[in-house]
Amino acid sequence: MTRDSKDSGKTSSFTDIVLSSIADGIYATDRNKNVTLWSKGAERITGHWAEDVIGKPCKDFLSHTDEDGTPLCGTPRCPLTVIKTKKILPQHVITAHKSDRQRILVAVTAAPLTENGSIVGVVEAFRDVTKERELEKIKEGLTHMLIHDFKNPLHVVGIVLERLQDKENKKGISDKLLRMAYESCGELDSMIANLLEIAKMEKELELNRNLFSFSDMLSETVEKAMVLAAARGQRISAEIQSGMPEIFADRYILSRILGNLMGNAIKFTRDGGEITVSGSLSGGVFRIMVSDTGPGIPKQFHELVFDKYWQAKDDKTDARRGVGLGLAFCKMAVETHGGRIWVESEVGEGSKFVFTIPIGKC
């Protein structure tokens, strides 16, 4: 074996090591767009194995389209066709098919492979940006939702304050309008608190655990909610097991969980409806249930209601309700305590939100 052949073997081995270490997908084609190289990163991202694609036209399995779904393979807009201008193709986003036919978004860049001044193929690097794009859409949607949901209650408060400044109309302010202003302030406070608490939970902030009376916390939180419920003619009843021991947990967080669930029950229950809060202990686990006589939740949404930014819709008006942060916070907070939360509901039969919390040890 000559020295040149030894050096060539070492270079090839080193190149293989580098390619297998890169997370992004890298592949190369010849002039006819048949695959000549397929990296480990390309395998991980697409699920297509090198032995299955080497020698095949890339269009047979990637099926590139633009973000709108317009096919690119076999058209002048194909990245591998565009690159024949001998220019590097700037990064842009297109779609590709995985081995299971799932379509993903990939950010790609490509460059021509030249030999003696002639293009002999193309090399393309790509990475999966599907989740990034989803997060971008969520972020954009959240911004619009927050603007909308903050604007409405602020508008109500502004109307009341404006009338209070008008000496002639001050006496004409109805109890209903004052109630709306009060509820609007509560909505704003709840949204801000949920945003802050979710941010803390996502950073895995440690809970401020202390021993406290679970029964007292339940009673106090229920009493606060009764003010809002009474203004809507709703009735709240509490069924709390007597003789329950103290719990070692974050008192503030637990009261926020219960407050969110009761706030939702009040919000989605028609005026004059009933809400029941029950608390019990069994096997070292506290069980709390908030039930209402609201419209109920279709079974297919029972898991989705706890997703961040998911929103319920009013079947009659098709209007969305809320930013969808309260229940996401509840789920994160309950699970951080080592408990779990779920909903039991049928359309037209109201809803029961249940969560459990271990009694905990000092």
Image: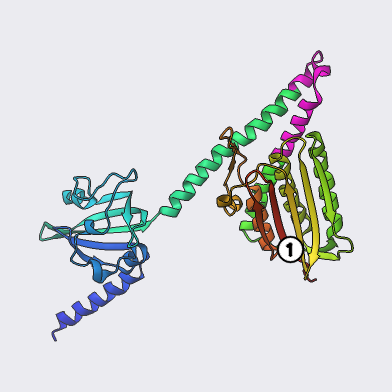
Q: Is residue 57 left or right of residue 269?
A: left
- Give the number of marks: 1
Residue sitting at 17 percent across and 58 percent down?
33
Of 195 and 325, which appears nearest the observer? 325
**Residue 310 image position (x, y, % from top left):** 57, 47
Q: Is residue 39 left or right of residue 287?
A: left
**Residue 182 image position (x, y, % from top left):** 77, 33
**Residue 356 image position (x, y, % from top left):** 72, 62
Quadrant where the image shows the C terminus: bottom right
Q: Is residue 188 above or below residue 222?
A: above
Within 10 angstroms of label 1, few (less than 14), some, or many (20 or more) residues?
many
Q: Where on the picture, by quarter, is residue 212?
A: bottom right
Residue sitting at 29 percent across and 69 percent down?
49
Residue 184: in magenta span: yes
Q: Where on the picture, by quarter, is residue 156?
A: top right
Quadrant where the image shows the N terminus: bottom left
Identify the main secondary structure in magenta: helix
Name the residue tied to disc 1: 357
SS at badge 1: strand
Residue sitting at 80 percent across and 35 percent down?
233
Outermost residue toward the right? 243
Q: Where on the picture, by quarter, is residue 53?
A: bottom left
Residue sitting at 58 percent across and 35 percent down?
319
Magenta-colored span: 162-187
**Residue 208 image position (x, y, % from top left):** 76, 61
Outermost residue toward the bottom? 1
Q: Is residue 344 left or right of residue 79?
A: right
Residue 223: in magenta span: no
Outermost residue toward the top? 168
Q: Which amino acid does the dot numbered 1 rest on? A: Ile
